[in-house]
């Protein structure tokens, strides 16, 4: 008794399906039946039969595939004529050149290798995930620039970052623009960025192209003054300035 081998899937070659002779030989409905016949054959080493030595009755096979019996009969007749399938001595059907619908040994080795690598990758991911009975690994601190919406402040912006931006965008007031960016982010919390360094650089580039930052006086702490504070500062400097002696 022949050992029955069931396949969960068979290779589907796109070019052969689109440009091969089957598209010309069979109608769209018949091509659908042909695919179903291949699927049934994959469960029995290329055979289309109810059991070894027992062919499918036509009406039973049509009912199983949920297609009209006339369509199934017409498809089988065409496939027999085109030598896509063959009639066995027991009247069952067999897919001709069934080996062509299988992978070569080289392809099988490649697939087995891909499956092993995929399983190893899944195992590594599973080991890295913290379990209920295992203390999670402490997260490594990253030096990537970020924005803390809760504390309303920038994170990991270093002095050398500002120096580099100032050199690249001399018309920009870096601190002022960072304040503007902060207010924009707070006003648009749904537009959080994946790369805040790129966001800052794009902002400064646009500001530089528009002529640079508006020059604003600052408090001793570095924050920009309000318009009233600027006027008071100007008045104070003007009043305290010594008058020029007339000759």
Image (spheres, rainbow, N blue to C red):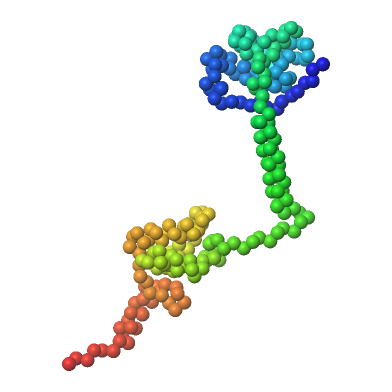
In-image side of 64 versus 241 (left or right): right
Q: Quarter holding the C terminus?
A: bottom left
Q: Residue furthest left?
A: 247
154 or 88: nearer the viewer: 88
Residue beneath the point at 67% across and 18% down? 98
Residue beneath the point at 32% across and 87% down? 240
The answer to whether residue 18 is visible is: yes
Q: Position of residue 22 (x, y in %)?
A: 56, 16
Q: Position of residue 110 (x, y in %)?
A: 66, 35
Residue beneath the point at 76% across and 56% down? 134
Instruction: Name the image quarter holding residue 118.
Output: top right
Q: Residue furthest right?
A: 1
110 or 124: nearer the viewer: 110
In-image side of 2 versus 176 (left or right): right
In-image side of 71 versus 57 (left or right): left
Instruction: Name the image quarter holding residue 54.
Output: top right
Residue beneath the point at 44% across and 79% down? 220
Q: Position of residue 86 (x, y in %)?
A: 67, 10
The answer to whether residue 59 is visible is: no
In-image side of 172 versus 43 (left or right): left
Instruction: Name the image quarter holding residue 169.
Output: bottom left
Tally the marks. 0
195 or 105: nearer the viewer: 105
Q: Is residue 3 above or below residue 130?
A: above
């Amino acid at each position: 008794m022949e050992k029955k081998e069931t396949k969960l899937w068979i290779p589907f070659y796109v070019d052969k399906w689109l440009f091969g002779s089957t598209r010309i030989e069979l109608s769209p409905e018949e091509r659908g039946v042909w695919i179903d016949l291949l699927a049934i054959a994959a469960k029995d080493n290329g055979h289309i039969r109810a059991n070894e030595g027992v062919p499918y009755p036509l009406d039973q096979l049509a009912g199983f595939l949920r297609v009209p019996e006339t369509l199934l009969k017409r498809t089988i007749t065409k496939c027999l004529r085109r030598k896509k399938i063959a009639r066995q001595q027991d009247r069952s059907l067999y897919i001709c050149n069934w080996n062509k619908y299988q992978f070569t040994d080289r392809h099988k080795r490649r697939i087995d290798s891909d499956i092993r690598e995929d399983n190893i990758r899944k195992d590594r991911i599973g080991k890295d995930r913290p379990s209920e009975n295992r203390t999670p690994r402490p997260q490594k601190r990253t030096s990537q620039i970020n924005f803390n919406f809760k504390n309303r402040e920038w994170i990991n912006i270093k002095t050398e970052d500002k120096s580099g931006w100032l050199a690249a965008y001399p018309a920009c007031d870096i601190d002022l623009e960072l304040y503007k960016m902060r207010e924009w982010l707070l006003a648009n919390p749904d537009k959080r960025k994946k790369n805040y360094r790129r966001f800052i650089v794009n902002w400064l580039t646009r500001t530089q192209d528009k002529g640079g930052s508006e020059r604003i006086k600052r408090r001793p702490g570095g924050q920009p003054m309000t318009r009233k504070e600027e006027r008071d500062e100007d008045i104070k400097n003007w009043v305290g300035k010594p008058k020029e002696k007339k000759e």
